[in-house]
Amino acid sequence: MKYHVKDMELAPAGRLRMEWAEREMPVLRRIRERFAAEKPLKGVRLSACLHVTTETGNLVRTLQAGGADLVLVASNPLSTQDDVAAALVTYDEIPVYAIKGEDNDTYYEHIHAALDHRPHVTMDDGADLVSTMHKKRPEVLETVLGGTEETTTGVIRLRAMAEEGALNYPIIAVNDALTKHLFDNRYGTGQSTLDGVIRATNVLIAGKTVVIAGYGWCSRGIAMRAQGLGANVIITEVDPLKALEAVMDGYRVMPMIEAAPVGDIFITATGDINVIDQPHFEVMKDGAIVCNSGHFNVEINLPALEALAGHEPRIVRPFVKQYTLPDGRRLNVLADGRLVNLSAAEGHPSAVMDMSFANQALSAEYMLRHAQELEHRVYAVPEEIDQAIAALKLEAMGVAIDVLTEAQRHYLGSWQEGT
Ligand code: ADE
C-alpha cells in the first residue's frame, strides 16, 4: 500500500485521539453500524480530500465499514493532524497522503494521488480535487459517478463551474444542509477560531476589540464567541442585509479602513481576496494580531504586508509571524493566513463534525443510488437526510420534543380557518 505521512510512530496517539473524538459522534456511530451491516458502498472507489483530523478519521472509517475502497488526502497544507494520518494507515490500512506543513507542490502531488485512485465518488472540502480533475486530469472523469462538497467556498466554486457548463458530474452540497452550516459553520467555527487564536497567542480576549470581516454563518459564530469572552466586536461587511443583521445583533459595523486603527485582533471569514490589504496594514496599531478562518489563505494580502515590511518576518511563537514595519509597528500574522482554527487548534469539535460528516456519509450513499438520474450540477442534501440527522442528534443528546396532534397537523394544512 502506498501512502505519504509524516511519522508512523505517531499512530498510537492518533488512534487514541480518534477514539476520544468518536465518543462525541453518536450519529456517525449509528451510521457506521448500519454501513457495516448493509455495505452500501461495497466496491466503490472513493477519493476524499478533507482536513485530516480525528473527526475525518472517524468519517473515513465509517465509509470503509460501508465497503468503500478509499484514499484520503489533505484539503489544506496546514490542517493535517499527523498522528491521525499515521493511525489510519497503520490500523485501518487506509492510504493517506497528508503531512502538516507540506509545501504547495507536495499538496498537489497528494491530490494527484487521490485522482490516480480513479474514484467513482469524490468527497471534497474546498473543491481542489474536483477542479484539479477537470483542469489537469480529465481522463479521470470517465469513471466518476458523483461527489460531495463540504464547505461554503467549495460550493461557490462548484456552482460557478456548473453555471459555465464546466462541471462534468453531479455534486451534493453538504455545506448547504441545515444540520451542517447552522451548526458546524456557526458553533464549530465560532469555538475553534477563538481556540486557535488563544492557543497561538495566549492573549486575553476580554476587553480587546475584535474585528471580524464578514457576517455569514462562520463570522456569526466567531462574533458570538468573541463577545461571550468579553471582546468589543466590530463587523465589516459588503452585503447590506448581513450588515443590518449585525447591527441589530448589537455589533458595531463599519468599513475595514475605519476598523483597522482600532482593532486589536482581526479575523477574516469572507471567502474573498484581500479583505485586509495594504491601506489597512498602514494604519493598524502596534501589536495587532491578524488571522483568517476562511477556506483559502487569500483574505489577508500577505505579499503586500511583506512588501511594506521590506524583510522576512520573525517567528515569535509557533504559528505567529511578526512583521516589523519601517515605523516600528509590529503586526502579528497567525498560521500564515491559513485557517487559524485548523492550523493552530484542532478544527471544529467532534460534536458538530458528527452532523457534518453524517451528512457526508449519507450523501455519498444517496449519490450512488441516484447518480444516474442526476444532472451535472450542484444539488442540495435531500431534506429527509437533514431531518433524520437532526432527530438522531437530539435522541443521542437525550432531548425529547413534542409531536403534532392530529388537529394541529390538520390546522397547518388548511387555509379556511382565520380570525
Ligand atoms: N473543518 C473544520 N473543522 C474540521 C474538523 N475538525 N475535521 C474536519 N474538517 C473540519
Image: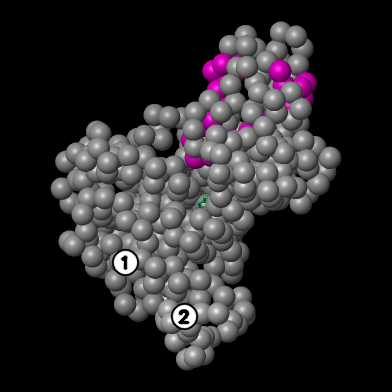
- Position above or below: 307 against 347: above
Residue drawn at (39%, 46%) of the image: 155
Q: How crowded is mark 1: few (under 14 residues within 10 Å), some or many (20 or more)?
A: some
Left or right of residue 263, residue 133 in this image:
left
- Residue 122, given in percent of the width and then of the height, sits at 31, 52
- Position above or below: 304 against 410: above
The way the protein has been coloured in the rendering is one colour
- Residue 320, given in percent of the width and then of the height, sits at 67, 30
> Which region is colored magenta?
283-306
- Residue 182, given in percent of the width and then of the height, sits at 54, 58
Comparing 385 with 48, the one in front is 385
* Extreme residue in the bottom direction: 406
- Residue 418, given in percent of the width and then of the height, sits at 51, 79
**Dots 1 and 2: beta carbons under 8 Å?**
no
Left or right of residue 247, residue 307 in this image:
left
* Extreme residue in the right direction: 207
Answer with the quarter of the image where residue 132 lies: top left
Answer with the quarter of the image where residue 43 lies: bottom left
Badge 1 or badge 2: first in the primary sequence? 1
Disc 1 element? helix
Q: Which residue is labeled 1 in the image?
A: 365
Q: Which residue is labeled 2 in the image?
A: 412
- Position above or below: 109 against 346: above
Comparing 129 with 54, the one in front is 129
Residue drawn at (56%, 59%) of the image: 183
Comparing 35 with 384, the one in front is 384
Q: Is residue 303 visible?
A: yes
